[in-house]
Image (cartoon, helix red, strand yellow):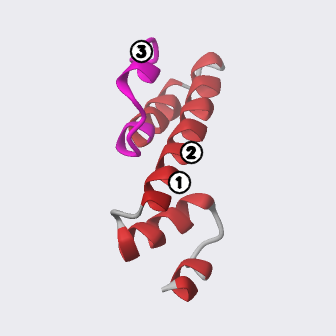
Amino acid sequence: QQEQVAAPAGDSALDYYVRARAIDNDSSDVQALAADLGAAILTVAEVALAEGRYAEAEVLFLEAQELGVADEDLVGLEL
C-alpha cells in the first residue's frame, strides 16, 4: 500500500490525497491530509475572490467544501 501512495499518477498534494483515500479512506492520516488540503484550497479561493476571479473562486470554494472545510470557515465566502 505504501508504494501506491508514494507513486501517484500526478505529483500534487491532491493527487496523493486521492490515492491515499482510495487505499484507506478511514485513516486518521488521510483525514488530516484532507483538512490540510481543504484549508490550503480555501486560502487560494479567498485570493481568487479578492482578485475578482469569481468563477475560479467558486470552483475552489466547492472543492474546499468537499474536503470537509467547516461551515464556520466558509462564512463570508458565499458567491
**For residue 32, above or below residue 20:** above
Instruction: Tell me what residue is drawn at x 63 percent, y 17 percent.
Output: 50
* Marks 1 and 3, how far apart at CA: 22 Å
For mark 2, what is the residue?
36
**For residue 69, above or below residue 72:** below
Secondary element at image label 3: loop
Residue 79 appears in the figure: no
Q: Decide: few, some or many residues near mark 1? Use Cα within 10 Å; few <14, some 14-19, many ≥20.
A: some
Secondary element at image label 2: helix
> In the displayed structure, does residue 45 sit left or right of residue 47?
left
**For residue 35, above or below residue 25:** above
Q: Are marks 1 and 2 in contact (CB under 8 Å)?
A: yes
Secondary element at image label 1: helix
For mark 1, what is the residue?
33
Instruction: Tell me what residue is drawn at x 46 percent, y 70 percent.
Output: 20
For mark 3, what is the residue?
75
Residue 30: percent from left, percent from top: 46, 60
Of all residues, the one furthest to the top in this rendering is 76
Residue 74: percent from left, percent from top: 43, 22
Residue 37: percent from left, percent from top: 55, 47
Q: Quadrant of residue 43?
A: top right
Q: Earlier in the sequence, mark 1 or mark 3?
A: 1
Is label 3 or label 2 in front? 2
What residue range appears in magenta? 64-79
